[in-house]
Amino acid sequence: MKKYLLAIDAGTGSGRAVLFDLKGNQISLGQKEWTHIKEEGVKGSMGFDCQKNWKLLCECIKEATKKIDKKDILAVSATSMREGVVAYDKNGHEIWAVANVDARASQEVRKLKESFLGVEEEFYAKSGQTFALGALPRLLWLKKNRPQIYEKIDKISMISDWVLAKLGGVIASDPSNAGTSGIFSLEKREWESSFAKKIGIKDDIFPPVFECGEVISKVTNNDCGLDKNTKVVMGGGDVQLGCAGLGVVEEGETAILGGTFWQQVVNVKDPKPPKDMSIRINPHVIKNLSQAEGITFFSGMVVRWFRDAFCQDEIKQAQALKIDIYDLLEKKASKVPAGSYGILPIFSDVMRYGKWYHASPSFLGLGLDPNRYNLASMFRALEENAAVVSMENLENISRFSKLQSDEIVFAGGASKGALWSQILSSVTGKRVKVPKVKEATALGCAISAGVGAGVYESIQKAAKELVKWEREYEPDLKDHQIYKTVRDKWKRAYESQLKLVDENILQSMWKAPGL
């Protein structure tokens, strides 16, 4: 009788359920897009709709498992966008939740910095996180603006924990996702309740911590049709489990996950963050490892915007040819030389974790020659720009960690693009490896479930066994030299564009709360 592992992924833009066999082969997928709640009168709000999204996740689970006997699913685990927080009352019912880039707490971030001088630096030294996307300012916002909800809070968790709580009735957290809350110790891999107490937040609302792969309970909720004997296993953050699903489980190994956001991660053993607060440090799903991380904002979203705004004819053409629109755009962009005729996209800046904001979205360097400055060139320039910003982030991490790798594992939706993969290799000057399983985060989540079910001895061993490679790319050395010039020009151009934001001439694409 064939057995299975189920991974549930609550992402920024959608929920997914992915079924795997015990050899790591993806069997089926259920996916539903969702949007987050912008509360009227609450600037920067991005609420997470637990009731609606749970129904969508159940639909995903039913879709992914409709052709099998549910009793053959040995275990289920969950992953999610990080930083998203769910609050529960004493009965375990969700009473408030926000998605990852909810930015309602800008005033609270500013107040924390002004009222507790040096506290952000103090907390960052232990947690690897700044206030920008952390839970503490959001809880302060809730205490001030929704006191009737705040007073009812008995527990908080991350969104992946919420999925497992819905399935198995136990509220718990894991280090990899809880670590992104900013209320968590990198060294101890436990909640740091003293942070909450110091700034006047409840310090008794933190659930037990389970390591990724540990069994929490069995399924108790029949909403999704899963069997009650299926084990519910602790999962983790999408990036960290994505790295497990890419085989990036040893010190120094490097990955880029190219989705809505791009994350550049390097595994490190020493969890002590840099004093300049330039990068982020997170607990890995591997117990003795942390991850130094850079983030590029909205890379995938920008390409999707470009597609929807400018590529209507190409969309129709791709539909007629029965090919993916991005394959068509890459085919056209592949005829454009490296450097895209000097076009410089201005979207995400390099990660500056301590004081982070972006310029206004724009394209610079456009000319009036339609044979050069056209849709194909602009599309290629966007792909090049994502690689350039990734390279800058990786170099910042290397300076901090003193670690270098000759290769990068590239995954996520962007890795489906052969041109994008080659551009990344040529920009960085490193070998780029693309896995066969594109759902790396879901595979990592399934590995976690498999460890809990006793199928695999450990996450590390399973990752090395199950991850297979589809393609590899070597850098074009001629293009690599061209991209060095592109990087230099982009950095100088971006600096100038930030000044236009500073002078209130243009509006920032995104600012960290409190700036």
Image (cartoon, grey):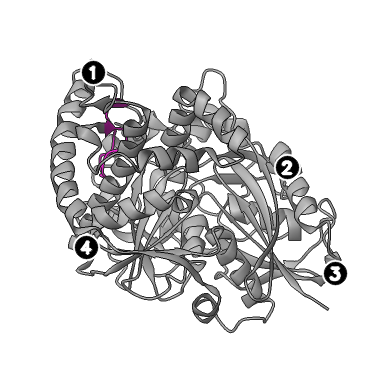
Residue at left offset 37%, top offset 35%: 379
Q: What's under tag 1, amino acid-wise?
A: Leu
Nearest-to-viewer mark from 2 and 1: 1
The number of discs equals 4
Label 1 and label 4: CA atoms lie apart by 40 Å
Residue under label 4: 398
Look at the picture and state if 276 lies above or below 244: above
351 drawn magenta: yes
Q: What's under tag 2, amino acid-wise?
A: Leu
Tell me where residue 21 sits by quadrant. Answer: bottom right
Residue at left offset 47%, top offset 42%: 260
Residue furthest bottom in the image: 457
Region in magenta? 345-362
Q: Label 4: few (<14), some or many (≥20) within 10 Å?
A: some
Nearest-to-viewer mark from 1 and 3: 1
Horizontal and vertical percent position of residue 114: 27, 35
Counting residues from the start of the chain, the first of labels 3 and 4 encountered is 3
Residue 56: which disc? 2
Q: What's under tag 3, amino acid-wise?
A: Lys
Q: Label 1: few (<14), some or many (≥20) within 10 Å?
A: few
Tell me where residue 505 sits by quadrant. Answer: top left
Task: Work out whether residue 108 or residue 343 is closer to the camera in this orientation and state it.
Answer: 343
Residue under label 1: 368
Counting residues from the start of the chain, the first of labels 3 and 2 encountered is 2
Residue under label 3: 71
Q: What's under tag 4, amino acid-wise?
A: Ser
Horizontal and vertical percent position of residue 27: 70, 63
* Kind of element beneath mark 1: loop
